[in-house]
Image (cartoon, rainbow, N blue to C red):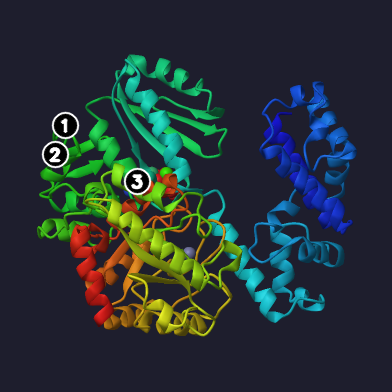
Amino acid sequence: MNKKEIQDALEEIALLLELKGENPFKVRAHQNAARALETASENIAALIDTGTLREIKGIGEGLAKKIEEMSATGRSTLLDKLRAEFPDTIFELFRVPGLGPKKIRALHDQLGVSSLGELEYACRENRLLELSGFGAATQEKVLQGIDFVRRQAGRHLQHRALMVAEELLTFLQNHPAIQRASIAGSLRRRMETVKDIDLIAACAKKDRKRVAEEFCALPMVDVITGSGDTKTSVRLSSGPAVDLRLVTNKEYPYALLHFTGSKEHNIAMRQRAISRGLKLSEYGLFDGEALLAARDETAIFDHLGLPYIPPELREDRGEIAAAEAGGLPVLIGQTDIRGILHVHSNYSDGSHSIRELAEWCRDHGFGYLGLCDHSVSAAYAGGLKPEEINRQHEEIDRLNEEFDDFRIFKGIESDITADGGLDYPEKILAKFDFVIASIHSKLTMTEQEATRRLVRAIKNPYTTIVGHLTGRLLTAREGYPLEMNAVLEAAAEAGTTIELNASPHRLDIDWRHIKATRDRGIKIAINPDAHSPAGMEDLRYGLGIARKGWLRAEDVINTLSATAFADFLKRAKSR
Ligand code: DGT
Ligand code: CA
Ligand code: ZN
């Protein structure tokens, strides 16, 4: 077993011990050991040989023995024994939001529940009500959680899929037999989560077999799950499945259009073709038997009397009608972004100094940085106390004096309290150039409670931007329910900007609501919610979602120049 496998095994042991109700110290010892290995060398065998394993803080004699066993034999007697006590399916239960080891243990011991299916059945039979610590509300929440797990099953976060997809694409594009290649499917449409990675590549028929074999032999490929004449399917060791389609260079544009989808967009496009007496499929656009030649997707759209529709818009949400009427938006792009807002420094839970963050922005061509550390009630994240705010503002003033052509704005991410207030008195709120108001606590709310809480925060005259609107964590936690109309109504009326949080775990506000937001005249801020310079690169994912939401540069406040942004903030403050 390598280091990562040993760490995973220790975590699993901790989980199973906790499930058995064992001594919490024993549980924590295994968790700590897994974490202690994090900073240790990758070469565990060498650590053992040199006797340094036992010197690591958090690894005593007992744990060292267990690690030695795993390193030498590839097994753990303890883990094997624990695993035998529970069915594999028990791990499904940990994915249900709100269920921890204690509750899962009660479900297992008292109701014999050890899989998602059994849990759902038990809920439907009202069995959870018999357990102490459970009630009707918990049971309802568990049911919603099961539904969520089912919907998310097998979906991957966009950024992880994109990273490996781009590596595979580079392999294809560099391959001498490949004429052109592209990512297709939901990933090309920049969906927030994807089921799999779709790739299309053009090569001569005679080269297909060779290319497919070399593709399957790539180190990141775990198993080959299918291989046909044109389609090769694999699963990557990092998780996602990949479908590679090898077509001729002539078929390529039609295949790319078809496999980019969405399915709904394809159906509407096919309808349009039919209404013009044509037939559109993955193989071509045909007038009777004759292929209407197309070198690229633009040419296919052109045959159908349409301008090019960017992939992000291909969701059958009015893009074909808009294209027909010449009303497609000029979508925002990377180069439109002039400043970066919602960045945490080491004053709260960020890892870098204000200077380092500002210099990164400046060196990457941005004109300003809107610093937003956590506020006082976010104690877990080192939220700023009033005296720390003063110190931070002095530092920002000094840096601003030093920089030419670059500016740091004094922002804060102020927690929204349970009743919809902000967590600093007005006297302090007035010191900031702008305020992002976000919910970080008491996330369990009814739709009515959540809506009322947010609406009040949106109407607060100190709120410039409302942060990560629904609090969702993609594939992990559903956001609180919101009456979106009431929220947008309030933002439009108060002139409050809505954040598009670009963290690939959030991508919140959901793109499906962005066009309606824009149409109400509400401005959007695309914010990385960064905790380091690297985190600022997440802007990219926010831009993809912004484009899915039909946003133009003029809809987004951080496309303004530093001077225009300062004016915007001044106007926002005086409203
Ligand atoms: P995903 O994989 O669930 O994240 O979403 P997609 O859109 O990538 O779906 P996928 O991988 O099943 O198929 C890729 C594209 O192929 C899809 O966007 C449109 C096209 N496609 C697949 N099945 C159908 C179909 O039954 N009818 C039509 N018109 N197109 C299809
Ligand atoms: Ca797909
Ligand atoms: Zn936040």
Task: Give the vertical position of 208 relative to 125 (above or below).
Answer: above
| Label 2–label 1 contact, CB within 8 A | yes
Earlier along the polypeptide chain: callout 2 or callout 3? 2
Task: Say which of 388 and 130 sits in front.
Answer: 388
Residue highlighted by disc 1: 295
The mark found on residue 35 in the picture is none
Element under label 2? helix
Percent across and percent down for residue 178 are 31, 20
Task: Give the vertical position of 92 relative to 374 (above or below).
Answer: above
Percent across and percent down for residue 142 are 66, 69
Percent across and percent down for residue 427 are 41, 82
Q: Quadrant of residue 526?
A: bottom left
Q: Residue at x 73, y 41 (%)?
A: 36
Earlier along the polypeptide chain: callout 3 or callout 1? 1
| Label 2–label 3 contact, CB within 8 A | no
Query: Disc 3 and disc 1: Cα gap in Å?
Result: 44 Å
Check disc 3 and give the amino acid type.
Glu
**Residue 552 in view in this figure:** no
Residue highlighted by disc 3: 359
Q: Nearer the viewer, mark 3 or mark 1?
A: 3
Query: Disc 2 and disc 3: Cα gap in Å?
Result: 44 Å
Q: Residues within 10 Å of mark 1 (few under 14, many from 20)?
A: few
Task: Say which of 497 and 131 sits in front.
Answer: 497
Element under label 1? loop
Q: Residues within 10 Å of mark 2 (few under 14, many from 20)?
A: some
Q: Quadrant of residue 22?
A: bottom right
Check disc 2 and give the amino acid type.
Ala
Q: Residue at x 51, y 30 (%)?
A: 226
In the image, taking residue 75 as reference, residue 187 lies left or right, namely left
In the image, taking residue 68 as reference, residue 146 lies left or right, namely left
The mark found on residue 299 in the picture is 2
